[in-house]
Amino acid sequence: MKNRQPLRLMTAEGELRGGMDDDLFVFKGIPFAAAPTGALRWRAPQPVAPWPGVRDAVTFGDASWQNRELCQIAGGGDPGPLSEDCLYLNVWTPDVAPSRPLPVMVWLHGGGFAMGSGALPPYDGKRLAARGAVVVTINYRLGHLGFFAHPALDAEYRNGGVVNNFALLDQIAALQWVQRNIPVFGGNRDNVTLFGESSGARSILSLCCSPLAEGLFHKGIVQSAYGLPDRTRSAALQQGEQIAAHFGLKDATAEQLRALPAHAFWSLPPPLAQGPVPIAGDAVLPQPMLTTFMTARQHRIPLIAGSNSDEASVLTYFNVDTAEVMRQLRASRPLSYRLLKWLYDIHDDRLLGRAAARDMAFSVMPWILMRAQHNVGMPGWRYWFDYVSERSRDLYPHGAWHGNEVPYAFNTLAAMTPGDIGRPFTETDHLLSQRMADYWFTFARDVGEFSHRLEGELSWPAWHPEEDLTLSFGEKGKNALSLKRNFMRARLRLFRLMMRSMVKL
């Protein structure tokens, strides 16, 4: 049994006092950059001023401004206090003085770049850390505080190198903090796995394309990344001017923009709201992410990538009627409509639209990523998550919703409250969660650039175009692990070609 007294550790920025959770050391609310407020709004994250004495690290830091109610409904829970001063991270570690440095797993939360925090219950690092990893979760700037372009701000970069993706820079700053400090927590700075879901997964792909992030992490687990094209800088600049005009600042100066209240941005109407994608063309993301992966110019690191069986569940939050979309397609492009019906053999327009939307937005991305990995000579593993909690299968008739896999990957079902209090998680649910978390941890601990398979309950071979193997967690909602060959191959080939055309446009 470890000493139950609070642990004190000396980091590069100052001394921290952490706490205990059973036999794990936990440090919360560690600042990894200066508060991005006042004159530092819409600037690259700046170093933290060293603090005197000992800083308590037992309470989560504030989350970025966002819609609290939406995060509670769709983002994983209550994000806690909100503030523009939000650049904090949290660390769980089983041992600060291990005989060998431990693998490091850094989590980037999802939420469409508009909600979430590293402190939400599904992201508790306890169960992964108990397997032998140092787990880090972070906050980063959201919405227009994290992604913004305006001519007055561009003018501050007189020698080029304009920055618009401040949230991605926050993530890079957190990875730099890991490189400086993680050995003190028992972690191996040369074995850092970045993992994330939805916009967190999209962030990983963006960092795989950013020259500023190269070498800061060594592997990635990409959960439910979507294939929407990045926003162009010209479109972002136009929106920035529209936002300034919305606030009565037609010819805004940088000082006037920074004087606007931080909480005013998240409630902007849809045409002015920040979309769920980064901005392509700045110093952080010089080229669109899809272009970089389709031309196999991403950083050479091993990847796991996959998606869920009912990702189209996310369309509910955007009030998309899939049956109406199919009716419009049938009227405007009858050949495309008939092709979809042939590919899916589904004759209900609502279900056809749901399946097609899932695959075009989500399922095709892991397949594209695997091809890109093969083209740069790096191993990749593709998965499919199709498990639904035993007592809730009537509530999820089309499979696992967007985000449902997260507590399984973290093995945090015990910390979760089921959507219906009368449907508690079962022993079988927990077993599937343990299986998935074991694969994630094994990848972080063991995989390198020359790995050919990931060992586990089923030996999981790295993806190869001739075999095209996908590991399925669940089968039609039920508990099973299986390797699928050429899974969705015909339709994903077609959708990849369609995406390539979109990128060219």
Image (cartoon, rainbow, N blue to C red):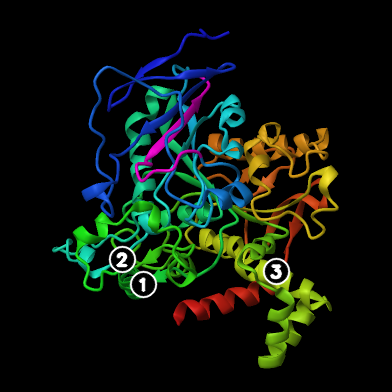
Disc 3 residue crowd, few under 14, some 14–19, many 20+, Cα 10 Å: few
The N terminus lies in quadrant: top right
Residue closest to the far front: 248
Residue range (magenta): 80-95
Disc sitting over residue 489 in the figure: 3
Q: Quadrant of residue 484?
A: bottom right
Disc sitting over residue 352 in the figure: none
Q: Is residue 435 left or right of residue 151?
A: right
Q: Position of residue 406 (x, y in %)?
A: 63, 44
* 244, above or below 500, in the image: above
Q: Is residue 370 left or right of residue 504?
A: right
Q: Position of residue 265 (x, y in %)?
A: 39, 59
Disc 2 residue crowd, few under 14, some 14–19, many 20+, Cα 10 Å: many
Q: Is residue 132 left or right of residue 213?
A: right
Q: To which residue does mark 1 refer?
A: 239
Residue closest to the far left: 158
Disc 1 to disc 2, C-alpha distance: 8 Å
Pick whichever of labels 1 and 2 is earlier in the sequence: 2
Residue nearest the observer in this picture, 132 or 323: 323
Q: Amino acid at mark 3?
A: Arg
Camera-side mark, 3 or 2: 2
Disc 1 residue crowd, few under 14, some 14–19, many 20+, Cα 10 Å: some
> Is residue 80 among the parts visible in the rendering?
yes
Q: Is residue 472 magenta?
A: no
Provide the secondary structure element on which disc 2 rests.
Answer: loop
> Is residue 304 among the parts visible in the rendering?
no
The C terminus lies in quadrant: bottom left
Disc sitting over residue 149 in the figure: 2
